[in-house]
Image (tube, helix red, strand yellow):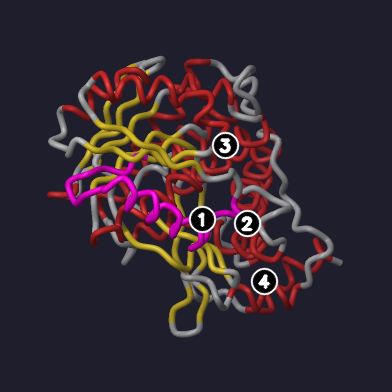
Amino acid sequence: MDARIRVELGENSYDIAIANGKLGRLGLELSQLNLGKKILIISNPEIFGHYGETVVGSLVQAGFEVCTHLIAAGEEYKNLTSIQQIYDTALENRIERSSTFLALGGGVIGDMTGFAAATWLRGINFVQVPTSLLAMVDASVGGKTGVNHPQGKNLIGAFYQPKFVMIDPTVLETLPLREFRAGMAEVIKYGVIWDRELFKELEIAESIDSYETISADLLDLILERSCQAKADVVGQDERESGIRAILNYGHTLGHAVESLTHYKQFVHGEGVAIGMALAGAIAMKMSLWTSDEVQRQDALIQKAGLPVDCPEHLQVGDILRTLQSDKKVRAGKVRFILPTKIGEVLITDQVRSELIEDVLTPMSA
């Protein structure tokens, strides 16, 4: 597969390149973008061990000066301490305003690198090379960057678009099974909120729960359709003042579950999966969609090897309190994205606490 998707954002527009086995082409791609000569690669030790040599070699061959900064893997490192360490490395290597930060890794690395790029010298070039399915279909596209606060996920951040996104699906060979499945949560999300045909393709597929068993054609379709969906939505609403909020489907309650389990019990996609199941149940109770649609969504989530149940040990009161600190709260009201049919959702702040409690209680009783 060799596809290009354009994210249309005026002067902030950029390309997403999807190319099997073409990671070594990265330097050539970046040499055409009028970037400065210095590139700081930000990655984690495991990912860099797999792909660092290819990426560095490609960049050096294209005439770039390359330095690196490695951050331990895990959501618990997505904080301001890690950002400070990136700044220290940037200072040591004299990273200038014309220079580039390059994220080589999953969503955590991409979010932190983007935030560091947005804030170093008031903004420098930023390139995404996602290595997880979740980052490929979601986190690397759209310019949301940031870090977690102890009281909530991604409370500190900025909208800051990359100059280029390079996706090589073959790097998913080294992705742990759990992380592949986590990425499928975001793919299912696109099916529910935007792309009914993608949802149907996932339903009829023989397998969607591992890189080894998913068909190559379906994986290509997933990457292209998911990136196109994200590009379409972001192109209409770069800074989430309107329709872009639908991309948060499953994230409202999902973030609460992640936060209350201290980002240690669930990876992000698992939180989103639980959040989608809960949002679907809320939508059914509000008569927005049917029990059949709830069952179809939950069956697809489980087909991807993902959870649908809220952890029993979480207290309903704690979840409701955590929702109040969510970024999506407006005038004290939590905004929910709720499905009305497969492929369509609405944004509402009319979900009563009692209804949320009603949905959560059977699961946490």
Image spot of residue 320 (x, y percent):
66, 76
Distance of mark 1 from mark 2, alpha carbons? 8 Å
Q: Amino acid at mark 4?
A: Ile
Identify the residue under disc 4: 356
The quadrant holding residue 225 is top left
Earlier sequence position, callout 3 versus callout 4? 3
Identify the residue under disc 1: 249
Residue 34 left/right relative to 145: left
Using the image, determine if residue 95 lies above or below residue 310. Answer: above
Which of discs 1 and 3 lies nearer the camera? The answer is 3
Distance of mark 3 from mark 4, alpha carbons? 25 Å
Question: Mark 1–mark 2 contact, CB under 8 Å?
Answer: yes
Picture residue at 55% right of the left edge, 35% below the top: 45
Earlier sequence position, callout 3 versus callout 2? 3
Distance of mark 4 from mark 1, alpha carbons? 15 Å
Q: Which residues are magenta?
A: 75-102
Question: Mark 1–mark 3 contact, CB under 8 Å?
Answer: no
